[in-house]
Image (cartoon, rainbow, N blue to C red):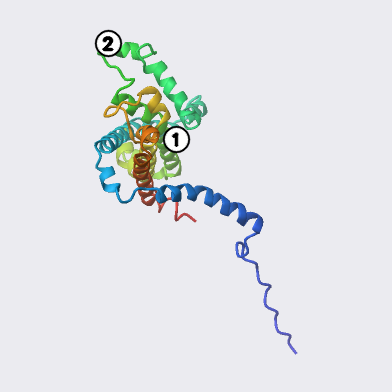
């Protein structure tokens, strides 16, 4: 008599039973992140929100924020994409040091970044005095200074994203283009850039979001002058001292922008396995 073959033992699928030791701190961490947003939405003056949003000060700060963040992002793309290509494709002495220097603004306190910009681009700075004497250009406490401060703190996000995309891209297409007689510039513009376009777009979005929310370097290097250097984060800071509802409305605008950015990047992050 043939004995029936016993079925294989059932494997326990990881994650079916969540340990309480992990569930409790995970729930606390989620609440820690979500509750401040819930509090912001709960205290929002929904009835007077349209009038608050139409206030001249809010619109001025919003326009200035969108303008400076966009210009800063374009500056970061123009300078950061070639820098990322250099770090990803060219072997040169000190490349690790250059990569480390590129990431310094990520860990540097923004206020310290603003002070550093003053020491370089201020009227008595390393380059500021020369710019003022030669071209009559003054950067501190101007709209151009806001752009410079935002680009300084936001560019590492773009460089890191583009360098990662370049390292992950298949170099055989570039080699094939070179074999067919394409020069370095033609290969870069017609082959490399299309390959890494999603990485450039994601890096630019992150760069724009970081520039939009910049506070410390901006207020230190450019000041807080309405209509000239007062961006949305600075307007929130000022409104907290005089009008809490206005500060909440401004915060809601920044929150809406953040949610829109997250929705735009959901296929890249949120739905990742």
Would you identify the image quadrant in which residue 158 lies? top left
Q: Single out the residue that lies furthest toward the top.
A: 133
Mark 1 and mark 2: Cα distance apart in space: 36 Å
The residue lying toward the viewer, choosing from 49 and 95, is 49
Is residue 13 placed above or below 107 in the rendered structure? below
Q: From the image, state whether disc 1 or disc 2 is nearer to you.
A: 2
Q: Secondary structure at mark 2?
A: helix
Q: Residue at x 66, y 55 (%)?
A: 21
Dot 1 crowding, Cα within 10 Å, few <14, some 14–19, many 20+? some
Disc 1 and disc 2 in contact, CB within 8 angstroms: no
The residue lying toward the viewer, choosing from 29 and 105, is 29
Per the rendering, the mark at residue 134 is 2
Q: Secondary structure at mark 1?
A: helix
Residue 226, how many percent across, how many down?
29, 28
Dot 1 corresponds to which residue? 88
Q: Residue at x 57, y 54 (%)?
A: 27
Dot 2 crowding, Cα within 10 Å, few <14, some 14–19, many 20+? few
């Amino acid at each position: 008599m043939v004995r029936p073959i016993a079925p294989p033992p059932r494997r326990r699928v990881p994650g079916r039973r969540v340990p309480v030791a992990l569930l409790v701190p995970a729930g606390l961490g989620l609440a820690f992140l979500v509750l401040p947003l819930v509090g912001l939405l709960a205290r929002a003056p929904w009835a007077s929100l349209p009038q608050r949003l139409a206030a001249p000060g809010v619109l001025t700060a919003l326009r200035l924020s969108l303008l400076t963040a966009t210009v800063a992002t374009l500056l970061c793309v123009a300078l950061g994409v070639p820098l990322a290509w250099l770090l990803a494709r060219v072997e040169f002495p000190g490349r690790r040091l250059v990569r480390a220097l590129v990431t310094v603004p990520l860990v540097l306190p923004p206020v310290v970044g603003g002070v550093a910009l003053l020491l370089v681009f201020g009227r008595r700075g390393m380059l500021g005095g020369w710019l003022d004497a030669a071209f009559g250009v003054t950067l501190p406490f101007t709209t151009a200074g806001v752009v410079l401060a935002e680009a300084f703190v936001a560019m590492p996000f773009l460089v890191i994203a583009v360098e990662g995309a370049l390292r992950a891209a298949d170099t055989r297409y570039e080699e094939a283009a070179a074999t067919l007689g394409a020069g370095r510039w033609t290969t870069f513009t017609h082959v490399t850039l299309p390959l890494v376009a999603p990485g450039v777009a994601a890096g630019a979005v992150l760069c724009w979001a970081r520039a939009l929310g910049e506070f410390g370097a901006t207020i230190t290097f450019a000041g807080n002058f309405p209509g000239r250097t007062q961006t949305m984060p600075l307007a929130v800071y000022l409104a907290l001292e005089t009008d809490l509802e206005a500060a909440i409305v401004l915060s809601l605008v920044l929150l809406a922008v953040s949610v829109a950015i997250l929705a735009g990047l959901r296929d890249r992050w949120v739905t990742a396995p």
